[in-house]
Amino acid sequence: MRQMNWEFETITKHTQDILIIVDQNQLVKFVTPSIELILGYRPEEFVGRNAFEPLFPEDRDRLMASHREVIIYNEPKVDEYRVVHKNGEIKNLESRVMLIPNHPDKLAVVSIRDITLRKSMEAELEKRKNRYQELQNKLKAYSQDLSMVLKIVDLKNRLIRELETVIPESAPSIVIYHRKSNSFDGRLPLGLSAYLPTLTVGKLQQDNDLIHILIGERKEKSYVLTIKASSLKESMDSIWFETLIFYTVMVFESLNVIENLMNQLENALQKNERPQWILRLLFQLSEKQRMELSSDLHDTVLQNQMLQYRSLKAILKEYHFEEEINLQLKGMVQGLADSIHQIRMTCHELRPPLLRELGLLTSLENLFDFTQISSSFKIRFTTENTDDLVLNEEETIGIYRIVQELLNNAVKHSQASILDFHIHRIADRISLHYSDDGKGFESEKLTPTFNSIGLSGMRERIKSLDGTIEFDSQPGKGLRVRMEIPLSV
């Protein structure tokens, strides 16, 4: 008996977890010294008190009910909850409660473990996962928007807006340096003039807490972006920013060519209207840019992510870790898998897989099936007289991109429940009719002069194919689009 008492005293004195004995009235009868290490209370301060008094108010009723269930059903229970440390700090605990068999006072033994660090790590991992997903979605939206940008000033404004939205602390600014007159447009960041000769397009140059990037050059003008280096707090923020700059520089270089052509054209014709051939050139350049961007993402970022994914899986298979570390590593593996999936999706949107090989109709069916998985609306797709339909590459891509834009509009704005697409071939022409039952909008927004990137982009895409397009909408009555293009084959 004396030996057992000595062993019990040794265990209760040196255990890392808290052991408490509580009666049916929830009063503490015994507590191990470890309570002082975890919650700051000396054992003598806690004995005789209500065991649930230090609990976080929002968790107290739940735990008291759980304790009553243990007494009634005599079945152990495990709970997680928050407790207020003696110094006011909030601690996260996990407890296992079980009755002492056949005890007349229905005493319960409570084993309590401090899981504050684990919960903090879980919260941090969830925060990082959400931030990563947000950055991926922002990049996706940004790359899609850039495909519709036709002027450098629009690119500049879109870049600033993106940085202000995603990293508000970055304080972005773009300065235009006129090399001929050695003057600046915009407020000159401290120290920038000294770095101008060393700046290379797309390369980051850090000066204390400022990062300078030369976005591009045009007509004796250098466009330099400056942000606060301290705003890039995480490595994922830095990777997102570098990818954003990569996209922007590529579009800037394309716009240089496009704006030169546009200026020459406008000077020659002395009017603002763009003829069909220049629109076709613009869209061909846009598709080339999408293809190059998709290829770059696939060959660099995606391959790096897949390498890290395989390496981490090999480590998990070869080594054994503690349960908590093992769970965290598995979470990282899942995060990498999600990242790989997202990059593949972006590559597929930039360059639809097998569009040329499968043809328009099968590619649209695949697009609708894929969109349907993550959308709340139903898509109905019908065709008429298309058994021997043959389209060239430009017509196939043009119609496919217009359908993509209609789907994007439906996801972002329409609040529709049903989308109808109908493709009909009549002699040497092909028509696409679209309608939805969404919220619609004012007819004024359908005029060619209205500033809508989506509508103007579709109009110009159809114009480049020598076709026609009509929009019809009213508030509460959805949107209807009718387009028709001549077949070249």
Image (tube, grey):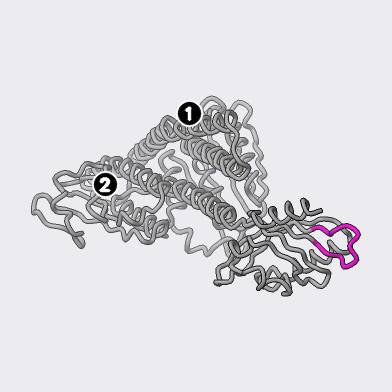
Q: Nearer the viewer, residue 104 or 454?
A: 104
Q: Earlier in the sequence, mark 1 or mark 2?
A: 2
Residue displayed at 49% across by 38% down:
343
Spot occupied by residue 415 in the image (x, y as percentages of width and height)? 61, 58
In the displayed structure, does residue 390 sit left or right of residue 19? Answer: left
Q: Secondary structure at mark 1?
A: loop
> Based on the displayed image, in which of its 4 quarters is residue 110 positioned?
bottom right
Residue 203 position within the rendered picture, expressed as x and y whole percent measured from the top left: 26, 42
Q: Is residue 262 visible?
A: no
Boundaries of the magenta span: 98-108
Q: Quadrant of residue 23?
A: bottom right
Q: Which residue is mark 2?
A: 215
Label of residue 125 in the image: none
What is the magenta segment's predominant secondary structure?
A: loop
Is 45 in front, or is 172?
Answer: 45
Left or right of 390? Residue 454 is left
Locate residue 354 relative to residue 199 in the image: left or right.
right
- Residue neighbourhood size for the residue with mark 1, other residues' Cα within 10 Å, grouped as few (<14), some (14–19), many (≥20): few
Report the residue at 57% width, 63% height from top: 474
Percent position of residue 37, x then y: 58, 62
Viewer-nearest residue: 241 or 472: 241
Mark 1 or 2: the one toward you: 2
Image disc number at residue 392: 1
Is 335 situated above or below 479? above
Labels in figure, total: 2
Using the image as rendered, state which of residue 226 and residue 51 is in the foreground: 51
